[in-house]
Image (spheres, coloured by chain):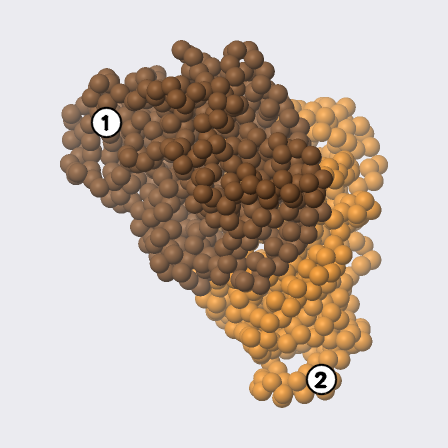
Chain colours: A orange, B brown
């Protein structure tokens, strides 16, 4: 059988790896304080796969034979677990449903093509048979881009690109690498680093997401301030469509009308199957440091990030957590880590006294990255630190930064841990102009708290700013609460409230998670009725047979 | 009557301003050398407007009345000269045709709406009457985006946005300005500068082009290395469409599916009428300098620009002319200018000897800009100059840079001057990855020279590199020849040869001039058959009545 690895059928990451807090003494008290959850109560383990019921595949034998002739018997399956793995992404809605064996519709068959030729044959076979194709990368999506529509009557193919994962070619002179769309973060970065290059794209999902998935959802990474969002990075594209391949050649810029490149980016599978992407790559930088800073409060941290964005400085990461997220970060730090010692020891209180900071509960933790040549990184640091100081902050070195670098990809495991114990947690992120960020922040908090009050639950919300641009930034909220018997309905109340507050405050429905089914209800409010109609026209005209992941993005 | 100013009906710029060479002693010998044209032969002046025949307006009285009720009698005209002004842009094809009174089709009526409400009424009236709308900004287009199709049977409205030119609002905190689409470069920049801001967008057409036009054609400016292309700068958009306005709110970034913002950018009027753009603006920089450099030859200059793009340096302008364009620049310099003295005097020969440069004919002139705080500009200069030196170049200060800054917008006048004397000149520009630039360059030269040989004319071609990106740059070619009795046919042979060489060498059909009718034949070769089909689907679905500038970009 195919060697493509998948995440757990029921949760994030690989089997045997999970969140634990034995070495994090502050964690249990924090969770009790934040959502009222007592971690000493026993967890409910996920039922073994053998105990759940999965709807049978609806694919006809004849059609399965047809597809088998294309990819070979080893690279096609109608197996229950494989179909469950390919049904959802990893949003809290997905996790709750998969645990409840709530499968309104699963894919009928999973195929693993070897190359673009096979993808073309699969696409043409699907169109001919009036089947549906849903491209699948790492399965980390959290906006419902992967699930078949519940009402789908046709055969649904999950087209897994996991075998197409090679770095095909590096144009060293141009800093461009041609990479197959199914390459996952660590794999492709390793192939690049081996030759002295980096992509510089590190989304939180990095360890389990693919290049094709990043392009399909307009992804951003932690170092995007320096390397750009995937929309900047992805210069060339190959997209298999009925009857042929759409080819966008790698160009630094072009004025060829409405950008077809930008139509493919964020298309979530609706315009065809992305098979190959030519991306900008950079020489592995001489320096790649992440420094930690503390600000007296959120307002100061926000103002500092804005001042940095306005300045001539070009750091690789600009991130500041609000007081609650800072407290969370400290609570999930290992006992032995420098940052915990720093906080719980005498250093911080002494410094606070020195600076006249009154309230430990208000301090905000910030991470700022510097990359490039030694002298460039040094200069950026000096430019940034002058602004940090101006806004009342101070640096605490690279210790916590290294910590951040190490654990940044681990947070998703926490969701499964909490869900085992009856608490639901997920995220909503957005972007807005600098002038609106404080309002967006305040309104999202108020919306979440109103939703918690309505539900009668003790809820938690926390946030950070990341991804600074000239005219604004991304705000990223994490929320959690102990759910009752109707977790999805409760989640909907909270999620809806936060998303609506984004739109009403002049922010967008998502900065880098895409639209899928989850955010589709806000599309029209975000880009206007006319904008949604233009987009629908594009999707309908490009896919009149509704072969490609129908219903996503626009809900139609 | 409306106070909207236009360029000459027959050429570039305003009446009374033109190219002259009394103070440029090297110019006449240069022209003789380059294209064999003797400037002492008398020029053929353009015939007065009264002597040319213009096809009558085909608009019905009833429809004109309907439009008059919307914009008022002062803001509508069917006058011959106004219709001629609105028939073409300013490409050499346009200039040749307008001089020959070759008008396959003119607009039937020109309207000047006061605001978005009137634009909406005009759009709805046009759809109802099955008329065509061609939005018109400054009229500087050189790819045939403005002319009605020769075969157009319906009434054609030229919708001139010249009255909509205000800077409406500056969000100082976010660095965002809301500006009406009809604002011309100098006017909008003056409104911004008055308040301490700059847009930083300075295309060659700056003095006679509009914000809406820049967006509609995916424009780039001379300082785009720093400020970004218009696709980066334009964050929010308002586009009037049948039945309502498409609104893209100003966001620093968003993951709302295929980017409708990017569909509007470069749409050349085909998706509706752009009425307002929210753009990124920057505080007027402390320093804004342009320095000149010389390189021993084109290869060295090209390699230096590439090294700068790969480095941590962020200059605002990176531009290097090839030897022929450098010679042209020196030939068009005023006698009294520092650069001429530098070249014709003893300084350069002395320096060349010192550096061991053998051939004055090979030297290449480069302009590099530095903007920002005093210390930022200083550091960028020092980083860049180390690389210039490494590639054998040396600096000659800001003298020629100031000259460049002053005369950069005057070059288009030269075309009319040459046309008066029987020579046709125009430009073709493109972009490609760094690894392909030398090939693109060599092939374009070869293609032009083959075309000249085929025509049996003495032709000239010269080029510069501008707009550097991480993975490539723009190459900008200017070509000229003394035409015979069939100037358009001859021009087509040369232009076609150069454009085809771009595509065949892996470059794009245009970096920043758009597609229009002129480049439409290469669209499919550039973005693939599938890409062109997806684009056509977008245009057809968004404009089923073919109201908006039909036929442009895709030729359909």
> Taking A170 as reference, is B75 left or right?
left
The residue lying toward the viewer, choosing from A15 and A345, is A345
- Along the line of sight, which residue is nearer the eye, B451 or B234? B451
Would you identify the image quadrant in which residue A240 lies? top right
Label 1 belongs to which residue? B81
Indicate whether B539 appears above or below A191.
above
Label 1 crowd bin: few (<14), some (14–19), many (20+), radius 10 Å: some
Q: Are marks 2 and 1 on the same chain?
A: no
**Residue indicated by mark 2:** A347
Q: Is residue A18 above or below residue A281?
A: below
- Report the number of numbered marks: 2
Residue drawn at point x = 76 percent, y = 56 percent: A286
Q: Say which element carries label 1.
A: helix
Residue at x 69%, y 38% (from the top left corner): B357
The chain that hosts pointer 2 is A
Q: Most extreme residue toward the front, as rendered? A: B346
Does dot 2 land on a helix, a strand or a loop?
A: helix
- Please tell me which residue lies in front, B110 or A267: B110
Which circle marks residue A355 in the picture? none
Task: Tell me if residue B335 can be seen.
Answer: yes
Q: Is residue A350 left or right of residue B431?
A: right
Give the image location of residue B449, x and y in percent.
Answer: 58, 18
| Subunit ID for the residue under disc 1 | B
User: How far apart in space, not on screen, are marks 2 and 1 (Cα)?
Assistant: 79 Å
Residue at x-position 34% and y-position 26% = B88
């Amino acid at each position: 059988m195919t060697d493509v690895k998948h995440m757990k059928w029921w949760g994030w990451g690989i089997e045997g790896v999970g969140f634990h807090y034995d070495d994090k003494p502050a964690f249990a008290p924090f969770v009790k304080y934040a959502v009222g959850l007592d971690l000493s109560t026993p967890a409910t383990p996920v039922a073994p796969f053998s105990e759940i019921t999965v709807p049978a595949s609806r694919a006809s034998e004849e059609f399965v034979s047809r597809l088998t002739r294309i990819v070979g018997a080893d690279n096609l399956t109608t197996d229950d677990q494989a179909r469950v793995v390919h049904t959802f992404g990893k949003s809290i809605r997905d996790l709750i449903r998969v645990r409840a064996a709530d499968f309104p519709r699963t894919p009928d068959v999973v195929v693993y093509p070897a190359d673009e030729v096979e993808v073309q044959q699969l696409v043409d076979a699907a169109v001919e048979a009036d089947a549906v194709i849903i491209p699948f990368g790492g399965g980390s999506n959290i906006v419902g881009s992967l699930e078949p529509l519940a009402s789908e009557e046709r055969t649904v193919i999950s087209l897994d690109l996991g075998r197409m994962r090679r770095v095909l070619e590096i144009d060293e002179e141009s800093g461009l690498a041609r990479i197959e769309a199914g390459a996952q973060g660590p794999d492709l970065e390793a192939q690049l680093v081996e030759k002295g290059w980096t992509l510089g794209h590190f989304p939180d999902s990095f360890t389990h997401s693919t290049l094709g998935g990043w392009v399909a959802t307009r992804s951003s990474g932690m170092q995007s301030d320096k390397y750009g969002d995937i929309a900047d990075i992805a210069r060339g594209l190959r997209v298999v469509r009925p009857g042929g391949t759409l080819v966008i050649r790698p160009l630094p810029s072009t004025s060829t009308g409405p950008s077809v490149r930008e139509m493919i980016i964020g298309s979530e599978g609706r315009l065809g199957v992305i098979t190959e992407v030519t991306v900008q790559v950079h020489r592995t930088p001489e320096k790649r440091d992440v420094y930690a800073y503390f600000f007296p409060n959120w307002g100061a941290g926000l103002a500092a990030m804005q001042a940095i964005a306005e300045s001539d400085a070009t750091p690789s990461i600009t991130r500041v957590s609000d007081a609650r997220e800072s407290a969370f970060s400290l609570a999930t730090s290992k006992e032995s880590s420098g940052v915990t010692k720093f906080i719980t020891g005498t250093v911080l209180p002494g410094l606070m006294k020195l600076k006249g900071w009154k309230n430990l509960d208000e301090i905000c933790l910030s991470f700022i990255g510097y990359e490039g040549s030694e002298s460039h990184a040094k200069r950026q640091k000096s430019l940034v630190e002058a602004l940090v100081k101006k806004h009342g902050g101070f640096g605490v070195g690279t210790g916590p930064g290294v910590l951040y670098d190490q654990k940044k990809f681990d947070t998703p495991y926490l969701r499964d841990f909490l869900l085992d114990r009856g608490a639901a947690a997920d995220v909503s992120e957005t972007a807005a102009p600098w002038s609106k960020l404080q309002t967006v922040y305040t309104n999202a908090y108020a919306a979440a708290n109103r939703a918690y009050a309505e539900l009668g639950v003790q809820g938690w919300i926390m946030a950070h700013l990341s991804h600074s641009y000239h005219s604004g930034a991304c705000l990223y909220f994490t929320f959690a609460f102990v759910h009752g018997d109707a977790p999805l309905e409760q989640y909907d109340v909270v999620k809806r409230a936060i998303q609506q507050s984004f739109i009403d405050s002049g922010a967008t429905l998502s900065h880098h998670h895409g639209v899928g089914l989850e955010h589709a209800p806000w599309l029209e409010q975000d880009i206007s009725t006319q904008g949604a109609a233009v987009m629908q026209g594009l999707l309908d005209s490009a896919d009149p047979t509704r072969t490609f992941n129908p219903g996503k993005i626009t809900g139609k």
